[in-house]
Image: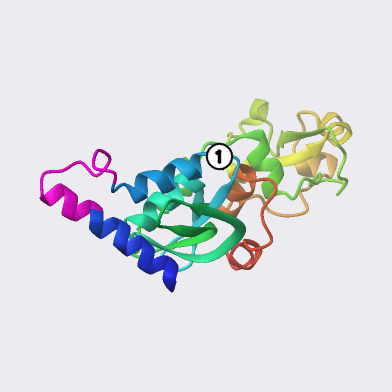
Amino acid sequence: MGNGATAQRVAVNGHQAARENGRDPAQDGDADAEVAVSAARRLTRGRVLVLNASYEPLNVCTVRRALVLLLKEKAEVLEHGDDVLRSETMRLDRPEVIRLVSFVRVPRDIHRRRITRKAVLARDGWTCQYCGSSKPALTVDHVIPRSRGGESVWENIVASCAPCNRKKGNRLPHEIRMHPKRNPRPPGPTVFIRIAAPRTPITWEPYLLTA
């Protein structure tokens, strides 16, 4: 990361040395990291994409959280925006995509992710899975109705427009010949990332497309 990484190492090392000498860096004026974090607070609307060490998208965090990870050398910057965070001795480009230095094991039991209307619609591309329309007022439908023994699981819930939902009612797909265009399944992390940050920066797209 060039000069940015050097500045981060100096800030972190200064904090460590101060603590080893029994001083609080926030009290002796040598608090570059705290100043940088304070500056990041002014960018609360910003979001940063966090990648695992394997470049797999993990989640979205605030600029402040990303800066803390960078200052602690737990992450590196892959993409940055136009804004600049400054302190008296530091200049950091605002991060947009960071990558963790150490690999984090992520539980693969994705079924534990809470099912929400927004997540179902995002997974299905905001289109009705029966007629393919993208009407504004989309609902969610149980492919096998709950009244017929259907469960509220990812594999049994799809996006549906209101007319299709009413038409299908409590009937099974084969009874009315209405089958989802795609077999529903648990979504990947990209779906939840797009929900957390609906307006994803263009710098995120290469990392999300490979997820």
In the image, is 119 to the left or to the right of 58? right
Residue 58, given in percent of the width and then of the height, sits at 48, 55
Outermost residue to the top: 147
Read off the magenta span.
15-29
Residue sitting at 72 percent across and 35 percent down? 141
Q: Nearer the viewer, residue 18 or 119?
A: 18
Q: Is residue 28 shown above or below 73?
A: above
Residue 149, given in percent of the width and then of the height, sits at 61, 31
The quarter in which the C terminus is drawn is bottom right
Q: Nearer the viewer, residue 130 or 121?
A: 121
Q: Residue 90 lies in what quarter of the image?
A: bottom left
The quarter in which the N terminus is drawn is bottom left
Residue sitting at 28 percent across and 48 percent down? 30
Circle 1 crowding by C-alpha within 10 Å: few under 14, some 14–19, many from 20: few
Residue 169, given in percent of the width and then of the height, sits at 80, 29
In the image, is 73 to the left or to the right of 49? left
Residue sitting at 72 percent across and 49 percent down? 124
Q: Secondary structure at mark 1?
A: loop
Residue type at mark 1? Answer: Thr
Q: Is residue 122 visible?
A: yes
Outermost residue to the bottom: 2
In the image, is 131 to the left or to the right of 154? right
Q: Is residue 149 shown above or below 131?
A: above
